[in-house]
Image (cartoon, helix red, strand yellow):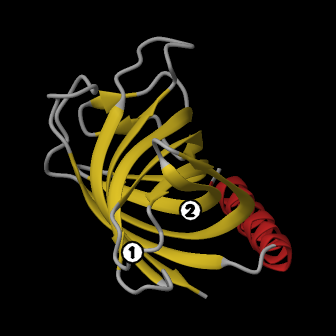
Amino acid sequence: MQLKGALSGKRVAIIISLFLSLLSSMSQSANLMLSVGKGMNDTLIQSESISGAKQFSLGYVWDSNYQFESEFFGNSKLEYELYVTEISDQQKLKAIVFRPVLNFMGDTSRSYNWYWQFGLGLSYFDSRMLGPIEFSSKGQFATMLGIGVPLDNKQNHRLTLRYNHYSNAYLSTPNPGLDTLSLDWHMRL
């Protein structure tokens, strides 16, 4: 059984490496994402508290070259993120997440302009358990709402405070959900 897990882990690492190589050749604007976070209690969506849990993530973010301007949102752009996260409480849960993220940048003529973002994507967990939370499946949707600020006028560095929610959208039950709050640093490569 351990050999099977090791082989599937190697396959996943190879697939991620190939995917990242392909992505880096597709976009001129790529970012490294580092994230630290904390589990939340059951105040919002999840059914059990994991407020003692810690979250660490490492990922890759790239621009889609899709941008639009609107009177309400200002300058907005779509980017994609692929990251690996580990959430540890009484045990560890690892996940791989792919998520399109829509950034509402507002007036980009001003330096250090606050922005907000929304993302909805897919995740795959390596386990169906984290502390008191038991998922009905390893596949989960990954939803995110964030607010951030560029740390320089070229947006080479950005900090974002994010609320992350993982759930299966009641495609199967139980659907307890998993909520974290994270601080993400994006650094242009």
The residue at 39%/87% (across/down) is: 152
- Residue at disc 2, secondary structure: strand
**Above or below 151: residue 14:** above
Could you tell whether 83 is left or right of 72 in the image?
right
Given residues 16 and 106, the one toward you in this image is 106
Q: Residues within 10 Å of mark 1 (few under 14, many from 20)?
A: few
x, y percent for residue 34: 43, 74
Circle 1 or circle 2, nearest the eye: 1
User: Which residue is disc 2 drawn over?
Assistant: 83
x, y percent for residue 150: 38, 76
- Amino acid type shown at disc 1: Arg
**Above or below 15: residue 72:** above
Given residues 73 and 85, the one toward you in this image is 73
User: Which residue is disc 1 drawn over?
Assistant: 110
The residue at 49%/21% (across/down) is: 136
For residue 23, what is the image quadrant?
Answer: bottom right
Given residues 136 and 182, the one toward you in this image is 182
Can residue 106 be seen?
yes
- Residue at disc 1, secondary structure: loop
For residue 81, what is the image quadrant?
Answer: bottom right
Could you tell whether 53 is left or right of 139 in the image?
left
- Amino acid type shown at disc 2: Tyr
Q: Which mark is residue 81?
A: none
The residue at 63%/59% (across/down) is: 79
Q: Residues within 10 Å of mark 2 (few under 14, many from 20)?
A: many
x, y percent for residue 19: 80, 66
Can you say which quadrant of the picture contains the C terminus? Answer: bottom right
Of pointers 1 and 2, the one earlier in the residue sequence: 2
